[in-house]
Amino acid sequence: MAGISSFGAYVPRYRLGSESVGWESAGQRSVANFDEDSVSMAVAAGIDCLNGRGRNLIDGLLFATTTPPYAEKQCASIIATALDLRRDIFTADITDVLRAGTTAMKSALDSVTAGSAKNVLVIASDSRQGAPKGEAERNSGDGAAAFIISNEDVIAEQAGSYTITENMMDTWRSAGDQFVRSWEDRFAIEEGLERILGEAVSGYMKKEGLVVTDVAKLALYCPDARRHGQLAGHLGFQPEQVQDPLFGRLGNTGVAFPLMLLASALEDGSPDQLLLTVSYGDGSDVLGFKTTTSIKDAEHGLGVSGYLDSGVVLDSYETYAKWRDVWLTDSSSRRPQAQSPSVTALWRESEQNIRFHGGTCNQCGYVQYPAQRVCVECQALDDYAPIRLSDQPGTVFTYSLDYLAGTVDTPLAIVVVDFEPGGRTLCMMTDREVDEVQIGLKVEMSFRKLRVVNGIHNYYWKAIPRRKAK
């Protein structure tokens, strides 16, 4: 039976919290760095999900978000390339509604059940922005979740679904809007969340012949902590049945939110548990999953808990506001406007820049990045095999700190990284504190934006300090 065979997640390193000057809130929320967006976070979650799995086995990729960097260009194709997936797979963006993540999950489950695909990667990622110092900004968070839907080695089988679709104007963002908008709270809660989610959950229970006590964990969408507790009680669930919504540590991650809670439930799951995922947005999707005995031996990457435990609180709200270009003036050095990247060069160099492939000499095993026609070790000509370096651990060989570069994260850290299987690259370093940058630092690669010029989002790989739970 179709179900989940692997899962992963990504939470950015940085948080706004009580220690952040000007934040004025006791709780924490995750914030994407200035060079992160929904695509880069999706790649990170995909890597976490694919940990130790053959990427050539993936038959499709569905990307769900309400914050795609492009209005007309498929983002799933960028993610598939960065993850080094096969070219002969189907890809799709599912967007414009908060329940896009569960819609993508259901589509993947239907594809696997129908036999049109064996393994489908589903990634939900969002970086929604509320008005400065407003309730939406305080309660939101940035993050991503990823799942492999398959009918082999399943750790949680599909256990039914139920969907309601209803036109509901309670939360929206029009083209050109920077911030999420919402209508009056009482209307949004009573006529939106409580009524629609109540109908959806009761409809699922009736369809599947279940009662509330059959559910082990409920991964429930809600905009904030207070309403989350009230809504779970309104639906008839006891506190021990409700998956921790992580408000005060993570925040509402939009499309990814119910799926990140599902990933959290799977991290602590045991066999024969019914997990319920409930999303919201112009209706509701309810997806049920029954854990199998395979969950006992399931291996996963850092996951939600690991990434949360490896976070760092920003020193001030001003830093975050500068990253988001919210309302503060950038006082960094003035530089000539960046030139538009060559689309031809981006396409031609995709293997080395997006897939991040180097070359391993078939004669002597020497690794070079980028791949070269002539091996510098044994001078063999045109005799090498591609090697993916994006998921290989590395070490800083040397570095430079540039305080005059005019970058958002002054100083600009440039590092030379030596990879464990061999190969060396010169790249920027991000997600770093200045005192962390040193020779011998253990790093990993992260897919990030270099810049956006003429509407072209120029992505590349940067080094970051190796993330691990504290």
Image (cartoon, rainbow, N blue to C red):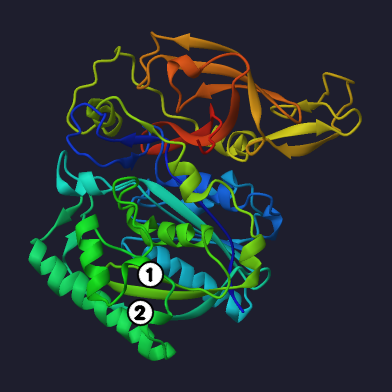
Judge left or right: residue 366 versus residue 206.
right
Q: Within 10 Å of the Cα at label 2, are there few (<14), some (14-19), or many (20+) other Cα atoms?
A: many
Given residues 292 and 84, the one toward you in this image is 292
Q: Within 10 Å of the Cα at label 1, are there few (<14), some (14-19), or many (20+) other Cα atoms?
A: some
Give the amino acid type for the residue marked by disc 1 in the picture: Gln
Judge left or right: residue 232 versus residue 121.
left
Separation of residues labelled 2 and 1 (CA atoms): 22 Å
Whole-percent x, y for residue 115 in the image: 64, 78
Q: Residue at x 38, y 52 (%)?
A: 72
Q: Is residue 40 visible?
A: no
Judge left or right: residue 232 versus residue 352.
left
Above-or-below relation of 1 to 85: below
Question: Looking at the image, is mark 2 or mark 1 earlier in the sequence?
Answer: 2
Whole-percent x, y for residue 335 in the image: 33, 14
Q: Which residue is mark 1?
A: 241
Disc 1 is placed on an element classified as: helix
Q: Which residue is mark 2?
A: 163
Task: Locate residue 36: give its quadrant.
Answer: top left
Looking at the image, is mark 2 or mark 1 nearer the viewer?
1
Give the amino acid type for the residue marked by disc 2 in the picture: Thr
